[in-house]
Image: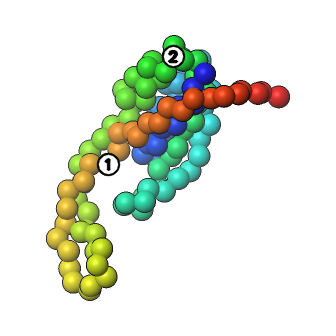
Amino acid sequence: MKLVMAIVKDDDSFNIMNALNIEGFSVTKLASTGGFLKVGNTTLICGVDDDKVDFVIDVIKKQGHSKKQFTNGINIDGNNYSQPPIEVTIGGATIFVLDVDKFVKV
């Protein structure tokens, strides 16, 4: 068994959860915040049999969408001067697949 953790845009979370539920997967939703852009994300976790991991990842890929957006430059040295905007890709999904040593449902 594996634990699939997917960090997705808040806007995509409902569609991803719905698609996974339709396919028979239970999903837990956690609110999270990205460290780079400091915007709200959703972290979805799902226990999956080993042979279903690729299928779950495909569902997440089909429902999660990425786009490009401009944001203010990041000031890493503490000086107070204006940074030019930079283009970043937001959305899509960041997916982790972890081994599960033990699964207990009570």
For residue 64, side relative to residue 72 (left or right)? right
Return the residue found at the far right: 106
**Which residue: 20% across, 74% down?**
83
- The numbered dot on residue 45 is none
Q: In this rendering, which labeled residue sits more in front, label 2 or label 1?
A: 2
Vertical comparison of 78 with 95: above or below = below
Real-space Cα distance between discs 2 and 1? 27 Å
Locate residue 60: give its quadrant.
top left
Note whether 71 is above or below 15 in the view shown: below
Q: Position of residue 4 (x, y in %)?
A: 53, 31
Q: Position of residue 73 (x, y in %)?
A: 24, 68
- Can I make out residue 27 in this image? yes
* Colour treatment of the image: rainbow
Task: Check disc 1 and report the residue beneath it.
Answer: 90
Residue at numbered disc 2: 52
In this view, which residue lies farthest toward the bottom? 80
Whether residue 21 appears in this view of the structure is no
Dot 2: within a 10 Å radius of its alpha carbon, few (fewer than 14), some, or many (20 or more) residues? few
* Point 36% across, 60% down: residue: 37
User: Which of the marked residues, 2 or 1, is nearer the chain's N terminus?
Assistant: 2
Quadrant for the N terminus in the image: top right
Closer-to-camera residue (102/80): 102
Q: Amino acid at mark 2?
A: Lys
Extreme residue in the front direction? 101
Looking at the picture, how far across and down is residue 75, in whole percent?
28, 74
Query: Mark 2 touching mark 1, by CB under 8 A?
Result: no
Q: Disc 1 marks which amino acid?
A: Ile
Q: Secondary structure at mark 1?
A: strand
